Amino acid sequence: MPLLLPRQNAPPTAAPPGVVVDYVNPMSIGDKVVISNVILGALAFVFVALRMLIKWRVLRTWGWEDFFIVLALLFLIGRVVIEVLNVKLWLLGIHVWDISPEMLLDIGNYQHNGVFIGDMLYFWGIMFTKLSILTLYAKIFKVKKVFRYSCYGMMAFTIVYLIMFFFLFAFNCNPPARTWHLLGWTGGGSCFDNIKTSYAVGGINIFTDVVILIMPLPLIYHLNLNFAHKLGLIAIFGTGILAVVCTIARQVIIVETLRDYDQTWAPVPEIIWLTAELCVGIICACLPTLAPIYSRKVISNILPSSLRNYLQSLRGRTSSSTSSSPKKSIPELGKNTNSESNIELVDRNYAGGYTNIDKANKEGYIQQTRAFDVECKPKVEWVL
């Protein structure tokens, strides 16, 4: 089979008519790669760090979904480092005709291999991102047996197809050494048509993204919550549509870049969108876990203990001075008294149990009354 990919068989390309060759100060779009990759990588790191903080300080539990998302982040960071090096050291983002033949022979293979390694890291990063989301689904909705096994089935499918395509791309040339030597290869050989393979992996990625996006929506719709809470949950889980958009955009761009012989310039948009797709996927995987961060309990647990104590002392002084607001009676507990109901104190300075007051006010008993407010809200628990 002849070599079919311009990316794998790209000869030094002459400048188009009317374009002046500039070896000294060539035009470059490499900074777009550096800026976008660093910003996207930093965003993903912040969201994963917040997720780990919530799990450590608040929920105090870890799961496979956290392990998978950390692995995905590591592959994303590796990809960002490779692409930045590709720009700074190996002239990615400069037209091939603006690189001298000597320089092209010197750095051409390094640049090609940098793009290639970045693509390989993408496969593993996107696989662990999808596994993290599906593992979280199975954990949240574990009471639904059919849904749980559907998650397991999607996980198996994701692992199989991504690893299969990884090896197809990694060993698409015969001999395999041909893949790593874009320029100066004299040993002959052949390669598979990676254009068609790229179409296939892109289409399956879009399919799995859409399936993962819509899987939890029917279950959320049937939860015993009011419309506002349902809408909020759907919005959180529905952010996965951004990952679908990134996948589609990347697939449209890759159709053009794979057929372009200017392979020191053309891959830049593809590289940016691949990183964006992986980054958005990681952020979407973290959002359901970050939802409880908006509650006061979670925020207070994240704060340092000294600041929490200070805020609690301020709240205690404030609540003790608001005796004019309507109060609810304290319940009566105990074996020899009539118990009506148990009301937990909102003011945590006085909490620690329930207050017992004898209704008959028997002689010898001392009553102490404190003013407090009772706050009644529907309680929504997140078990993640």
Image (cartoon, rainbow, N blue to C red):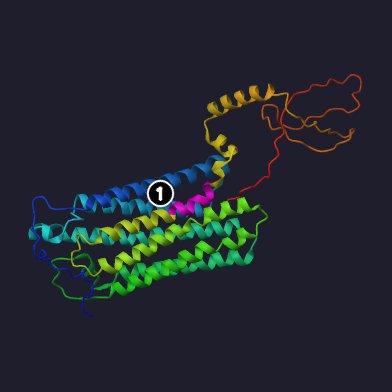
Is 122 situated above or below 365? Answer: below
- Mark 1 lies on a secondary structure that is helix
Which residue is at a point 21% across and 53% down the rendered structure image?
29
At which x and y percent is residue 351?
70, 30
- Is 287 colored magenta in this rendering? yes
Which amino acid type is marked by label 1? Ala
Q: Is residue 191 magenta?
A: no
Horizontally, residue 24 falls left or right of residue 166, namely left
In this orientation, which residue lies closer to the viewer: 105 or 275? 275
Q: Which residues are magenta?
A: 282-290
Identified at 54% across, 65% down, the residue is: 152
Q: Nearer the viewer, residue 191 or 47?
A: 47
- Depth order, front residue of 343/178: 343
Q: Position of residue 267 (x, y in %)?
A: 25, 61
Query: Taking 103 as reference, is 242 left or right?
Result: right
Q: Could you tell me what secondary structure mostly forms the magenta stretch? A: helix
Q: Which residue is mark 1?
A: 44
In which quadrant of the rendered view does residue 190 lie?
Answer: bottom left
